[in-house]
Amino acid sequence: MIEVRIHGRGGQGNVVAAYLLAIAAIDEGRYAQAFPSFGAERRGAPVVAFVRISDTPIRQRCEVLNPAFLIIQDETLLHVPGVLDGLVPGGGILVNTELDNEALSAQLGQPGQALPATRLAVQILGRPVPNTALLAAFLALTRILPMEALVKALSHRFKGEVLDKNTRLINEAAQKVPAGLWQEVAHARSA
Amino acid sequence: MPEALEGSQAIARAVALCRPHVVSAYPITPQTHIVENISKLVADGKLECEFVSVESEFSAASVALGAAAAGSRAYTASSSQGILLMSEVLYDIAGLRIPLVLTCANRAVSAPLSIWNDHQDSMAVRDAGWIQLYCMSNQEAVDTTIQAYRIAERTELPVMVCVDGFTLTHTLEPIDIPDQAQVDGYLPPFKFARALDPMNPMSIGTLVAPEYFTEVREVHHRALLKSVDEIESAARDWAELSGRDTAGLLEVYGSPDARVGMIAIGSAVGTLLDAMDRYPELGPVKLIRLRCFRPFPFEALKAACAGLSEVVVLERAFSPGSGGIVATEVRAALSELPEMPRVHGYAMGLGGRDIPLETYGRALEVVGREPPERFAVLDLRPEQIPAEEL
Amino acid sequence: MSEISIPVSKLRKKQPRFQGIDSGHRACPGCGAALTARLVTEASGPDVMLANATGCLEVFTTPWPESAWRVPWMHSVFENAAAIAAGMESAMKAQGKNTKVIALGGDGGTFDIGFQCLSGMLERGHNVLYVCYDNEAYMNTGVQRSSSTPHAAMTTTSPPGKERMGKRHLKKDIVAIVAAHHIPYAATASVAYPSDVRKKVRRAMAVDGPTFLHIHAPCPLGWGHDGARSIEIARLAVETGMFPLIELERGGLADVMPIRNPRPVTDYLKPQQRFRHLFKDDVRAREELEHLQAIADHNIEVYGLRGERPDALDTEAADTAHRGGMRWA
């Protein structure tokens, strides 16, 4: 079972990101579960969402304490204590940042994958919502689902021009990270 | 074909499939998405019903009551403060033996103020005279909602479907939504013999003097006790139709010949099941999920616990000044066994505190303790209690 | 066909009235609430469904296992008659039925504890006729004051004494509040004018939307007078201007029952024990009488109650003739 924790700030589509990932997995016939760390969120407040993906039914409903992967939607959260807690050894951290991989990894004190998701989103969508780009990069890195699954998941919510732009964004973002870099980790967890 | 749905969304679809005539709604976290989804279905013409946005939960229950009394299938949902505010009407509905289904999106009750998941709300009204069923998953919430209407309309007892707020309502997972034909086959149109009707006028809700009161209450009590049959047959028939078994009164997992048992309620059972698989060395353990809390399934529970020497009860509410609620009723039931197991009672996950996999192991540490744990909060953080209160 | 002439007195006997509430209930002799229920259901006919709040009416009509009601009737709790009615009305809409839903509440269940449910029902535009029988206190529980209790009246929770002259606050203007919801029709009526009550009920029944009737209903026990004088005292309330009879449509004044010769307020107050402290030799008492007269004068002025018009069709016979036709037995 693959467990992912997504950290963001209220208003960045933190829950939506989690739901989209789960929807993509479910559409592909996998079992998945996504939920926010429920709270009275306000715009800007740190928020967390959890995703589990598995080939067998998922029964537990506790928060993800030991994620295989972390997706950080807002790099200022790296200064918030606990954000990186519990990551499994060798687990992947994907951060929305303008820093390059080296600078990011130096800051984290461990390897991290950087993606200028907000910039890409502004360029292509015209809105600074980093979700789609981050999820696309995540799927490129882990190969746990085909990219089409993400497009399909988006098509439940968006149509026409917005969907087209998102599809372009997905392709752009996917190319910005080394494909399959986290495939082994993902595969190991899937077992 | 399972769809990726948020729990609330799925429950709304289930309600719509039951073809209610009247839905009354007042928002309260974490139930809001249920009524929002229903109103969207109505707005999109996918559900034809009178959707009444009332001005408080008190009116939500009252509108549903008025509608059902007038012969229309009705629905409402609430949580926490809303359940407490409508409690007067909840007692009235049950006492009047009006069939209704209500979703309680379980949430703690102020004070302290909390929007998060525990069972204080539904437990607070356990004596109102409703059937109370607790769901372990969102799939079960869908299936149970549909069963609830059948149970309510056959027993003329209202049914409260308890679904963990946030933990289930706001979780997205794959859910099979039955098709309309399936539900129509299972749930006939609402025919209520005592519906208000000018062609056959009757008076409902009269003043009942001491001469007559006791027997009315006894009949209600007996109806609840007898309803176990309908609850079980509703689940059986639905399992046959849908291929999904929600269990009737309770469900037993784990080792059938274990001597240690664990009893739990609601979505926490899912976590305990995964923990049981992950930590087989802590077993063998028999895990019993209590699906039906009212009526209390005395015989089924006794049968499930026969042969156990220790039982750990894990619940998500408690009675201040006394202790466990479920544990107390479990002890009462098991005291009727020729060899009563030692029962330990714990509350956990209060006010939405996360219930991690480790809970399973920690709960089992109490086994063998002398004397048995009457009541304690399993996930207490003593360092957060001021020194003067310790 | 030859002409048949029937004297008016016989005509009444030939036209049976619908009886929605049977005799044998447990109300006090002279009860205004019982009379209200009788008049309302007579005018409404049998194709109705009643939602009754807790209070005198509900209690004295339904001592299990007996019920005085001949129409479908339901009592839930104190606060929710309007919400129960809203639920019933929703059911009728969903079932495609025309049965009119009538909510019945006393002043307690309408002005106070039922206020929220009432406002909600009105705001949502339910096709419900809400009838408030106003006996100006929580009579069922022993004459405690409600927000409908008139200024200076004595109740068990607004007793006169060294520091007090009865209820301090003014009577809540419920019709103005209801009218502010801009509902199609709201009116006041009095059991002293039964044909007027029936007329207003019929008017409200014909409206597809929320309507409200505020009916003044004396309580001999609570007001402190002989049951035989209930009608007389209710009439005095109208004739002094203390209880104006008005009709409002969408919040605007549509009609009034004029008072040809307004009587001094003391004519109304004196026969009632609940105002007896105002007739002591006490400067505060005299002040309160002035206050009450001022209230009455204000009502007369604000609603334009002074006036003449041909005798209102206010007699039993005239009303019967007006109605004509077959009636349910």
Image (tube, coloured by chain):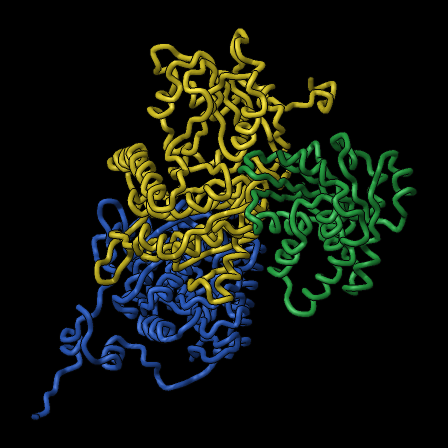
The C terminus of chain C is located in which quarter? bottom left
Can residue C114 be seen in this snapshot? no
The x and y percentages for residue A96 are 82, 49
Foreground residue among C166 and A175: A175
Above or below, B343 relative to C148: above
Q: Is residue C130 above or below residue C61?
A: below
Residue C252 x, y percent position in the rendering: 52, 77
Q: State the image coordinates of residue B123 (x, y, percent, origin top left).
A: 48, 33
Q: Is residue C44 left or right of residue B143?
A: left
Judging from the image, what is the letter of the chain drawn in green? A
Image location of residue B295, percent across then percent down: 36, 32
Q: Which chain is yellow?
A: B
Of all residues shown, which one is farthest toward the top? B370
Labels in figure, total: 0
Q: Is residue B338 visible?
A: yes
Q: Is residue C99 left or right of residue C107?
A: left
Splitting the image into 4 quarters, where does residue A77 fall? top right
Q: Along the horizontal axis of the image, is B10 left or right of A144?
A: left
Q: Is residue B254 left or right of residue C43?
A: right
Which residue is pictured at 50% across the width and 39% down the height?
Answer: B137
Q: Residue at x 38, y 20 (%)?
A: B333
Question: Which chain identifier belongs to the blue chain?
Answer: C
The quadrant of the image that shows the N terminus of chain C is bottom left
Quadrant of the image occupied by residue B231: top left
